[in-house]
């Protein structure tokens, strides 16, 4: 079955540590995204990538980094510079072409919950 | 910048009844897409319904339909014959059809409870 796999589902981090959240998709989608969700808030965009080896900052990129070395993978690193990293993180992907009817629909993974101890 | 507003933090509906969730948005663009996503307790985001702004006809998916008022910048979701499985957070979202198509902008969500 095609889909998006995020791991780990739960992650605990000590202050000052960097952690990396994994996101893998087998949907053959070109574009991938990372969102952060806090209680009582909608999703906010951290980073997105439309093609391999290219990515752009979203609204809240400070303290995060990403890479896009493969089409299928878009890992997110939460660095020690992120002052309030405890949150729920969602990865998503979509097709990039603008013609097909499904082009603008984002498919989401099941999410990763990060807690800073 | 585009914004999406959901004015109802929480809503409740009796099983088998109909409920409408409100969403308004602000944009200066003429070409865009609107979505409703459902997030059940599992926290998996699931697409409920989508609407292209250039289409005047309101989208419908089984028990889910929208009332899209482009001039008023309103995009409400109607759930008919509500079921217990409809209980979830519902997010309204906007996406530009132009430019890099990078960002899906979300409202803060409406928590829907379904009473048996």
Image (cartoon, grey):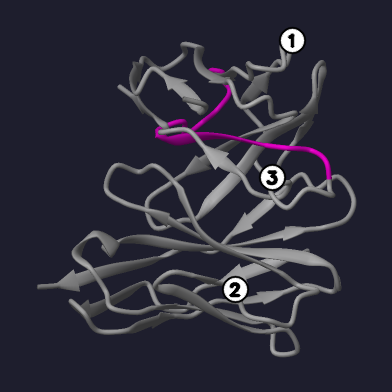
Tell me if mark 1 has few (under 14), some (14-19) or many (20+) residues whose alpha carbon lies within 10 angstroms of its own.
few
Does residue A86 belong to the magenta stretch?
A: yes
- Residue at 56% over, 40% down: A107
Q: Foreground: A96 or A78?
A: A96
Q: Is residue A109 above or below residue B17?
A: above
Answer few, some or many: residues within 10 Å of disc 3's Cα (few below 14, many 20 plus, some between 14 and 19).
few
Q: Which residue is mark 3?
A: A59
The x and y percentages for residue B63 are 39, 73
Give how far across and how far down residue A98 sits, in percent: 84, 48
Q: Which residue is mark 2?
A: B59
Side of B60 relative to B20 (left or right) = right
Marks 1 and 3 on same chain: yes
Picture quarter with the C terminus of chain A: top left
**On what subunit does the disc labeled 3 rest?**
A
The kind of secondary structure element at disc 3 is: loop
Pick the front one: B58 or A90: B58
Segment colored magenta:
A78-97
Identified at 30% across, 69% down, the residue is B112
Please report, as a chain letter, where disc 2 is located: B
Can residue B13 be seen here? The reply is: yes
Labels 1 and 2 share a subunit: no
Between the residue at mark 3 and the residue at mark 2, the CA separation in whole angstroms equals: 30 Å
Find the distance from the CA under tag 1 to the CA under tag 3: 22 Å
């Amino acid at each position: 079955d095609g889909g998006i796999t995020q791991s780990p589902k739960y992650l605990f981090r000590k202050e000052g540590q960097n952690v990396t959240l994994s996101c893998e998709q087998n949907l053959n989608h070109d574009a991938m995204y990372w969102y952060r969700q806090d209680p009582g808030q909608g999703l906010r965009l951290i980073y997105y990538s439309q093609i391999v080896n290219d990515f752009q900052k979203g609204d809240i990129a400070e303290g995060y980094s990403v890479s896009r070395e493969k089409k299928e993978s878009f890992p997110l690193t939460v660095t020690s510079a992120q002052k309030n990293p405890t949150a729920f993180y969602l990865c998503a992907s979509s097709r990039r072409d603008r013609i097909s009817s499904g082009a603008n629909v984002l498919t989401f993974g099941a999410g990763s919950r990060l807690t800073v101890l | 910048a585009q914004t999406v507003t959901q004015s109802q933090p929480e809503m409740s509906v009796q099983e088998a009844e109909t409920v409408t969730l409100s969403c308004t948005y602000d944009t200066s663009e003429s070409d865009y897409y609107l979505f409703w996503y459902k997030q059940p307790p599992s926290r998996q985001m699931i697409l409920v319904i989508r609407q292209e702004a250039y289409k005047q006809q309101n989208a419908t998916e089984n028990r889910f339909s929208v009332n899209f008022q482009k001039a008023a910048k309103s995009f409400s979701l109607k759930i008919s014959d509500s079921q217990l499985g409809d209980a979830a957070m519902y997010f309204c979202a906007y996406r530009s059809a132009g430019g890099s198509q990078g960002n899906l902008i979300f409202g803060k969500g409406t928590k829907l409870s379904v009473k048996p």
